[in-house]
């Protein structure tokens, strides 16, 4: 997936519908939280085992909710000028420093 292309497509989609005034970082973040709650709702009351063995209709619904969350994240990054690729690389490095892998001797 090309992040810049996805952001352009989402920007074009919103512009074609005159959603610009509503697509502020604050509003997009709030919408993201709503979509994340819808994602969580799929797993509500499931056992860990059930959450790992989804039927096809549930997996399809899960994919739609994951897509919604991702699209809102991409729009927030686009609106605020955050380079998603660079941010992920930086965060992976920070996580590796914060949570180093255990050293094994062999």
Image (cartoon, rainbow, N blue to C red):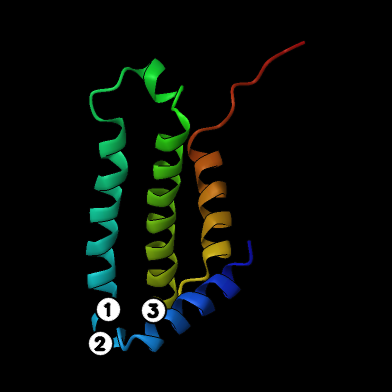
Relative height, residue 103 to residue 57 (above, below): above
> Which image quarter holds the N terminus?
bottom right
> Which image quarter holds the C terminus?
top right
The residue drawn where x is 22% and y is 63% is 30
User: Are the residues at dot 1 and dot 3 in contact (C-beta closer than 8 Å)?
Assistant: yes
Left or right: where 45 falls relative to 100: left
Whole-percent x and y of residue 23?
29, 78
Mark carried by residue 79: 3
Q: Marks 1/3: CA distance? A: 7 Å
Say which element carries label 3. helix
The residue drawn where x is 38% and y is 55% is 69
Name the residue beneath numbered marker 1.
24
Say which element carries label 2. helix
Q: Marks 1/2: CA distance? A: 7 Å
In the depicted view, which residue is nearer to us: 6 or 29?
Answer: 6
Res. 20 image quadrant: bottom left
User: Are the residues at dot 1 and dot 2 in contact (C-beta closer than 8 Å)?
Assistant: yes
Q: Earlier in the sequence, mark 3 or mark 2?
A: 2
Mark carried by residue 21: 2
Res. 17 image quadrant: bottom left
Whole-percent x and y of residue 9?
52, 77
The residue drawn where x is 72% and y is 13% is 105
Mark carried by residue 100: none
Whole-percent x and y of residue 35?
29, 53
In the depicted view, which residue is nearer to us: 57 or 69?
Answer: 57
Q: Marks 3/2: CA distance? A: 12 Å
Left or right: where 85 falls relative to 19: right
């Amino acid at each position: 997936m090309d992040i810049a292309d996805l952001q352009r497509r989402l920007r074009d989609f919103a512009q074609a519908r005159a959603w610009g005034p509503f697509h502020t970082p604050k509003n997009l973040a709030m919408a993201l939280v709503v979509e994340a709650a819808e994602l969580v709702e799929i797993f509500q009351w499931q056992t860990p085992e059930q959450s790992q063995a989804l039927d096809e209709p549930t997996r399809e619904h899960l994919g739609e909710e994951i897509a919604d969350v991702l699209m809102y994240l991409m729009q927030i990054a686009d609106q605020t000028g955050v380079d998603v690729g660079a941010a992920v690389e930086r965060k992976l490095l920070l996580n590796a420093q914060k949570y180093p892998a255990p050293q094994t001797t062999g």
